[in-house]
Amino acid sequence: MTVSRRSGARPLPRRGLLFGIVGVGLLATHVLFAGQGQPPGENPSSAAAPVPALSPYIEAHAHFDEHDLEGSVRAALDGLRRQNAAKIFFQAPPDTFEHQGHFDIEGILPLVKQHPDTLAVLGGGGTLNAMIQQSVASNDAGPDVRKTFKDRAEELLRDGVVGFGEMTAEHFAGGTPYQYAPADHPLFLLLADIAAEHGVPIDLHMEAVLQTMALPAGLTSPPNAPQLQENIKAFERLLAHNPRTAIIWAHGGSDATGDRTPNLSRRLLQAHPNLYIEIKTDPQKPGKNYPLVNDRIKPEWLKLLGDFPDRFIVGTDQHYPEPKGQPQRWQTVVLLLNQLPPDLRRKVGTENVLRIYAAKPTGSKTPR
């Protein structure tokens, strides 16, 4: 099989990204707080008008409308100022080749390259992830499949992606089909080695399943599997396979099975120093083990973030253009961020992202 899709973007070198964060933060703070008696956000409520973050943050997991690429970029740039965000990382959703209209990031890449200070891209959701799903279905992870997979991953790196994502090991049907692949599948292990070699992370969507269970209430089969397989052991094997690979577990705080508890996150963070977690809070579908109650952070979540201050980043799963007529995902994460102590807020908001992600100029080429 030949894959010809090309995509990707890299952020500025660390010094340039830091200057961008400070500049955007100061601008956004001036615009949003000017003429007000006190900064908004000190009495957060999702029912009130949206409030910006008290300090700049990097949005490490956002999506775009493949049918309105220019509108997506324009909306994200506009959102930076409202949110007091410094940078937004786009990802394509994890998908399969069989799903009509699947896409990766090649369409949005030229637009992202026009805004290297504020936008970046992860790649592979529509191709690398689809290749893993195809390999699972065919039970073929032989040399030819591995070579095609490696070639595609390295093509994305040459084009300038800052990481691989959005990948998935367990994803319920929605905008894309139901997908399952063991996290220790040979192609996932290969991807971990490629990511470690090039110093980029893997962003992984995986619903937590501690033991074989029936499909949770509220989900239907088909299209989802009627029974879910235990997946944490395979996840731990992926984490242990190459400790130099940063694995970002997407959607912390958005739990569809009930198994992704703060206690599970704590155990995995303690056991695997290369594990990081993105924070997502969806006001439309809060799910189980939600970090907020009445817009206030729950004590167990505050303690978890405080005990692992270097292991969490922001990844709201926000879509651009922003859906109309509903609360936005970025807003509830900002409500959470604004309740953190300043040092912890800076770590979760910006410092951890700068450390995790390779800092190479957008569009730079890896030698062939």
Image (tube, rainbow, N blue to C red):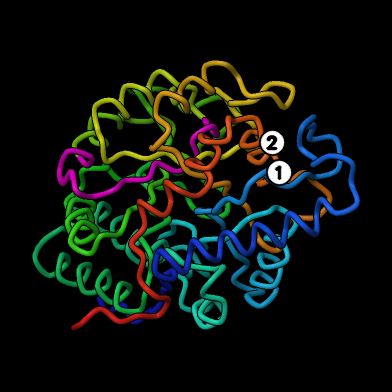
Horizontal placement of 320 versus 351: left or right? right
Quadrant for the N terminus in the image: bottom left
Q: Residue at x 52, y 39 (%)?
A: 279
| Image coordinates for residue 317, horizontal then vertical, percent | 57, 49
Residue that appears at 31% across and 46% down: 247
In percent of width and height, residue 299 lies at 57, 16
For residue 81, side relative to residue 256 (left or right)? right
Mark 1 belongs to which amino acid?
Gln
Quick check: marks 1 and 2 in contact, CB under 8 Å?
yes
Q: Quadrant of residue 332?
A: top right
Q: Which residues are magenta?
A: 238-255
Write down the residue under mark 1: 331
User: Is residue 148 one of those drawn in magenta?
Assistant: no
Q: Which mark is residue 253?
A: none
- At 24% from the left and 27% from the top, the residue drawn is 271
> Which numbered disc covers residue 335?
2
Q: Camera-side residue: 219 or 268? A: 268
